[in-house]
Image: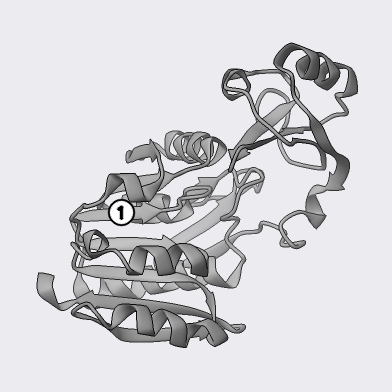
């Protein structure tokens, strides 16, 4: 995240390890952007080169360095450059843009910078859902990333719970809520460990494998509406087949640049 004298991202100095250590979750340093941990590996991101410091951490925590590289921020996340955009009534911008905005956010180095087609689809269809069905009192954001969907629904006035397995996503989401003076419950967890839950609207901008896993669990289908994305056209049939054992149907479908977003209605909770 941006802290101290840093007002924007320029260069990313990335140190990836084949393993991780719990102490790195609490590690802090003035040039640190954040610590990514997932599937047993750890990655440190800095604004500056930190070879000496990282060597000390390797010795202290028995880490095994796997990747060391410098990347321009403009080339990060498939070269998608965070920029201002509008959704419904809200003007939204990365926090380094001057101007008057309804929502500002620090995209950091996690998913959810606002310009990916699936993020756009989720935001645009969130607004369409609001207009068509009214405001859901409770919303669950699975895989919250930077928290952009959590911010959007919190701004609309819903009670939101945001979940992610990645500790950096949790920190970024909490930070973005704080700078917008918004409130939501933010939980670091594997979503499968939180099942079952019951809310009015579930948000899931996820990858196909996780969607298939969740779709196959009866304990997942306990809410009323599910807005999901993260898959392309060629993946739709397999995902639709996973819905057939349950009283669920796709009630609208939107497509953008080959990516797809569904709104699913759970008939058992109508």
Q: Which image quarter is the N terminus in?
A: top right
Q: SS of the residue at dot 1?
A: strand
- Residue depicted at x 61% and y 59%: 84
- Residue depicted at x 76% and y 17%: 57
What is the quadrant of residue 55 in the picture?
Answer: top right
What is the quadrant of residue 14 in the picture?
Answer: top right
Rendered location of residue 237, percent (x, y):
45, 88
- Residue depicted at x 62% and y 83%: 257
User: Can you say whether 226 is above or below 47 in the image?
Assistant: below
Left or right: residue 245 compared with residue 186: left
Rendered location of residue 5, percent (x, y):
73, 25
Left or right: residue 233 compared with residue 16: left
Q: Is residue 34 visible?
A: yes
Q: How many marks?
A: 1
Q: Which image quarter is the C terminus in?
A: bottom left
User: Can you say whether 98 is above or below 85 in the image?
Assistant: above
- Residue depicted at x 47% and y 43%: 165
Q: Judge by depth and name the residue closer to the eye, 174 or 7.
A: 174
Rendered location of residue 72, percent (x, y):
85, 48
Q: Judge by depth and name the residue closer to the eye, 228 or 219.
A: 219
Rendered location of residue 99, percent (x, y):
59, 50
Q: How is the image coloured?
A: one colour
Q: Is residue 1 visible?
A: no
Find disc 1 in the rendering and name its residue: 140
User: Can you say whether 156 is above or below 234 in the image?
Assistant: above
């Amino acid at each position: 995240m941006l802290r101290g004298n840093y007002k924007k991202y320029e260069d990313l100095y990335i140190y990836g390890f084949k393993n991780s250590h719990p102490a790195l979750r609490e590690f802090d340093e003035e040039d640190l952007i954040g610590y990514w941990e997932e599937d047993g590996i750890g990655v440190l991101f800095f604004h500056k080169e930190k070879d000496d410091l990282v060597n000390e951490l390797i010795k202290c925590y028995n880490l095994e360095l796997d990747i060391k590289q410098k990347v321009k921020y403009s080339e990060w996340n498939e070269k998608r450059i965070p920029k201002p955009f509008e959704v419904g009534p809200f003007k939204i911008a990365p926090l380094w843009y001057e101007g008057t905005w309804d929502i500002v956010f620090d995209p950091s180095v996690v998913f959810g910078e606002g310009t990916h087609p699936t993020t756009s689809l989720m935001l645009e269809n969130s607004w369409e859902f609001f207009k068509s069905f009214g405001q859901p009192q409770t919303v669950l954001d699975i895989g919250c990333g930077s928290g952009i969907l959590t911010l959007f629904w919190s701004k609309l006035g819903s009670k939101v719970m945001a979940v992610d397995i990645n500790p950096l996503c949790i920190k970024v989401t909490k930070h973005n809520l704080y700078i917008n003076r918004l409130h939501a419950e933010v939980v670091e967890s594997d979503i499968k460990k939180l099942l079952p839950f019951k809310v009015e609207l579930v948000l899931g901008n996820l990858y196909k494998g996780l969607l298939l896993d969740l779709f196959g669990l009866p304990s997942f289908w306990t809410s009323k509406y599910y807005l999901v994305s993260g898959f392309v056209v060629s993946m739709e049939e397999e995902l639709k087949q996973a819905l057939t054992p349950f009283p669920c149907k796709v009630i609208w479908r939107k497509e953008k640049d080959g990516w797809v977003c569904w709104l699913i209605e759970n008939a058992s909770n109508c």
